[in-house]
Amino acid sequence: MRYFKFPKWLRKVYPGAIWDFFIPNTKTIYLTFDDGPNKGTTEWILNLLKQYDAEASFFCLGKNVKKYPKLFDQIVRQGHQIGNHTNNHPNGALTKTSNYIDDVLAAEQLIPSKLFRPPYGKLSPKQYKVLKKKGFKTIFWSHISYDFDREFSSEKRVEKALRLVKNGSIVVFHDSDKAFPQLKGELPYLLETWSKAGYSFSAIPH
């Protein structure tokens, strides 16, 4: 699988969407975790974040919030931000707009947040406009960790993260069984390295 980065022209397709948060004279990385909550993974992530006094944004699936409500509550109690990642993780490019919007709204019944991240980063311009009119703020990313993809070596993922992530970057990790082995091996090292470089970790501003 080829490493993917959003082309700059794509920003014009989604006016008002968020890709990064550059603030001059700061050194801040915005950690985000998609697909949770998930038994085992969520607890581990929360414990690690606590060690670094790190705030993060968790883009949750409605179906997983329903399955693990106590884990969802734990995310909120520990001061992290929550966002809507749809109910059933549909691919926007392959889903009828009305069905897609219904899925997002179903998730909103369980996730009281207007921050939204489309699964796979796939969202049609029409879907984007409808969600924007309903008050949702779409959050894309600056860097995706590929923690779900074992075709990339750990060395390659870590090297790219350390080279490409900078002040204001929104970084995607995954709160899932598939990503957990990679997270355990790489996230502690990344947080330690970024911390030593003077970075702090914040949730995405509202």
Image (tube, helix red, strand yellow):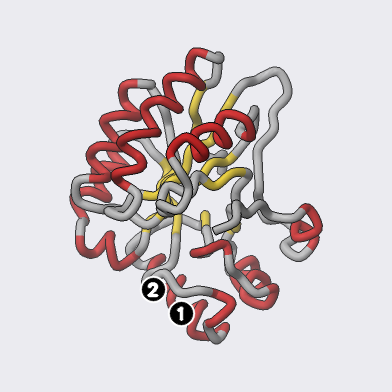
The amino acid sitting under disc 2 is Ala
- The residue depicted at 40 percent of the width and 25 percent of the height is 189
- The residue depicted at 30 percent of the width and 42 percent of the height is 75
Residue 58 percent location from the top left of the image: 40, 47
Say if 50 sits above or below 140 in the image.
Answer: above
State left or right for residue 90 relative to residue 182: right
Q: Out of 172 and 16, give the one closest to the viewer.
A: 172
State left or right for residue 47 relative to residue 203: left
Q: Out of 172 and 138, give the one closest to the viewer.
A: 172
State left or right for residue 47 relative to residue 188: left
Say if 51 sits above or below 16 in the image.
Answer: above
Indicate the quadrant where residue 165 lies. top right
What residue is disc 1 on?
102
Q: Are marks 2 and 1 in contact (CB under 8 Å)?
A: yes
Indicate the quadrant where residue 27 lies. top right
In the rendered image, the quadrant that contains the N terminus is bottom right
Q: Secondary structure at mark 1?
A: helix
Residue 191 percent location from the top left of the image: 43, 25
- Few, some or many residues within 10 Å of mark 1 (<14, 14–19, 20+): few
What residue is disc 2 on?
106
